[in-house]
Amino acid sequence: MPMLSADQAASRVFGAIVNLGGPGTYLHWGFIQISLANFLVIVVMVVVFLAAILLPFPHRGGPRS
Amino acid sequence: MSADVGTPAPLATGAPAPLPEDAGQWTARIRRRAVGAFPPERLLPDRQPAYVASWIYVFGVLTLTSLAVVALSGAVLALEGPSWWHQSRVGLFVNSTHLWSVELFFFFMVVHLWGKFFMAAWRGRRRATWITGVVSFIVSVGTAFTGYLSQQNFDSQWIGTQAKDGINATGAGAFFNVLNFGQMLMWHILLLPLVLGLIVVVHVLLVRKRGVVPPFPAKTAAAPALAGDVAPAPAATGGEKIGEQQ
């Protein structure tokens, strides 16, 4: 089996997750149009925002309620 | 032997104490106002109020941190030049670092914005803090936009040709031509970062001056919450020691 360079290995790993070789996927709701990538970023932002509010902040003696 | 009355005693910093007749100098007036508005213990406090111990208060610092990475990677790109960042492996890495730190900068800034919006962070004489934050967000959008125009690839060509009609329709095309690469690059690396840097410095100084906005008080039957009038947090006299929040 041929050895892969670091670039080839990285492109195989990340290329398997997100295929950037083709045209982007777009979502449509009526007059709203957004790329799937931008939509996912917004979803992640909302999740991080809610987690920042709900998760307890760690303290030296362990998280307080 | 008499003492030299013309030479004032040195201050703790080693600098000579100001002479009384110099109190009217503009340097003395500015110094008094600066120290009065930003005493060192408020400018760099050791403690923050207890309510700051929440993840939602972290995103302002994360935004500043990513902005520092943006500025540093941008400075390296400016030192080395376009052929370096397009053709060499290290240049491509720094170019990507610049891009992804911008993505994180906006990510953190928007979460910070949401948090402050739902806290009504303009309460307690913090209107200027809120407004400088909003203005810095708008200027950041312009800085990122000119950055995307400066990529020198098909993406930047597409963005420029799509944006030109909209920009020209506002009348700004007379001095802001999105098809002029050199002009967009200068806006991106000089004018807009200068404005953004100044606004961010003012924003952070206002946060230090007025204190971090407290959360809304808990509503109880005996004492209904009054959200409108929350006084600025006092200078760090109690609460959480910063080191304990890590």
Image (tube, coloured by chain):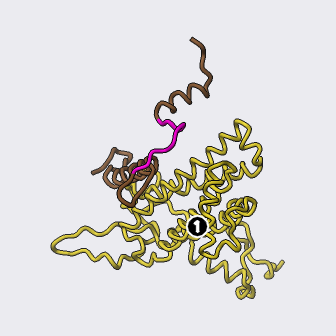
Chain colours: A brown, B yellow
For mark 1, name the chain: B
Q: Is residue A19 left or right of residue B220?
A: right
Task: Check the image and report above or below for B89 versus B189.
Answer: above
Query: Magenta part of the protein: which range?
Result: A18-27
In this picture, residue B239 sits left or right of residue B29: left
Q: Secondary structure at mark 1?
A: helix
Q: Is residue B185 positioned above or below B170 on the image? A: above
Along the line of sight, which residue is nearer the eye, B159 or B38? B159
Point 62% across, 62% down: residue: B143
Q: Nearer the viewer, residue A23 or B121?
A: A23
Image quarter for residue A25? top left
Residue type at the position of mark 1: Val
Q: Which residue is mark 1?
A: B139
Q: Residue at x 58, y 67 (%)?
A: B139
Residue B48 percent coordinates (x, y): 44, 61
**Main secondary-structure element of the magenta-colored stretch:** loop
Q: Quadrant of residue A61?
A: top left
Q: Crowding near pointer 1: few (<14 within 10 Å), some, many (20+)? A: some
